[in-house]
Image (spheres, rainbow, N blue to C red):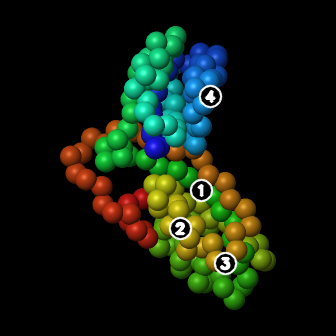
Amino acid sequence: MQHTLTVIVEDKPGVLARISAMFSNRGFNIHSLAVGPTHQDGRSRITLVVDAPELEQLKKQLNKLVNVIKVQEMEPAEALEREVMIIRISAQPSTRGEVRDTASLFDARVIDISSSAMTFEVAGTPQHLKTFLEHLGPYGVIDLVKSGRIAMKRESELTPAPVSAGVGK
């Protein structure tokens, strides 16, 4: 089962290495890892997506690490999750309009174009990016890169809308 964790840490050398080693030493695979500064100076948020049956003990051990301030597991219904993807698609002049129209349904931006390809940037939920790839994949994916997932707790009491083309990004 996949779990999304956010860990608030002090910006100190070796913190990320100690956290990732803790997962590795227990045989857990990290599917996604993103680190960035928070609104508070000297602090960063690490977002990890991990495949593990249960994380309660690991969360307790993470909380004991020096420089770890807060550990939180995100439940899917309470998390705002996003990734960014850059994807280069084969697009001959005869198919460019169709490719661009499809991409616009997902709010993807053209960031590069050549005589035989178009490169798009798209941000959204992991499902949004997966659906985008399913729609543009048949044109021929030349190259693709995705960021790690970032997440934050949802403040609203509303349940998220179902994800489909152009919705739930």
Label drawn at residue 24: 4
- In percent of width and height, residue 107 lies at 49, 66
Amino acid under disc 2: Phe
Q: Is residue 156 visible?
A: yes
Q: Earlier in the sequence, mark 2 or mark 4?
A: 4
- In percent of width and height, residue 70 lies at 41, 21
Would you call the spot at circle 2 few (<14 residues within 10 Å), some (14-19), or many (20 or more)?
Answer: many
Residue drawn 38% across and 63% down?
163
Quarter of the figure with the C terminus: bottom left
Would you call the spot at circle 3 few (<14 residues within 10 Å), some (14-19), or many (20 or more)?
Answer: some
**Element marked by disc 4:** helix
Contact, mark 4 vs mark 3 (Cβ under 8 Å) = no
Distance between mark 4 and mark 1 Cα atoms: 26 Å
Distance between mark 2 and mark 4 Cα atoms: 32 Å
Label drawn at residue 132: 2
Contact, mark 2 vs mark 1 (Cβ under 8 Å) = yes
Amino acid under disc 4: Ser
Location of mark 3 (residue): 139
- Using residue 59 as the reference point, say whether residue 24 is left or right of it: right
Q: Which is more toward the observer, 114 or 98?
A: 98
Label drawn at residue 85: 1
Amino acid under disc 1: Met
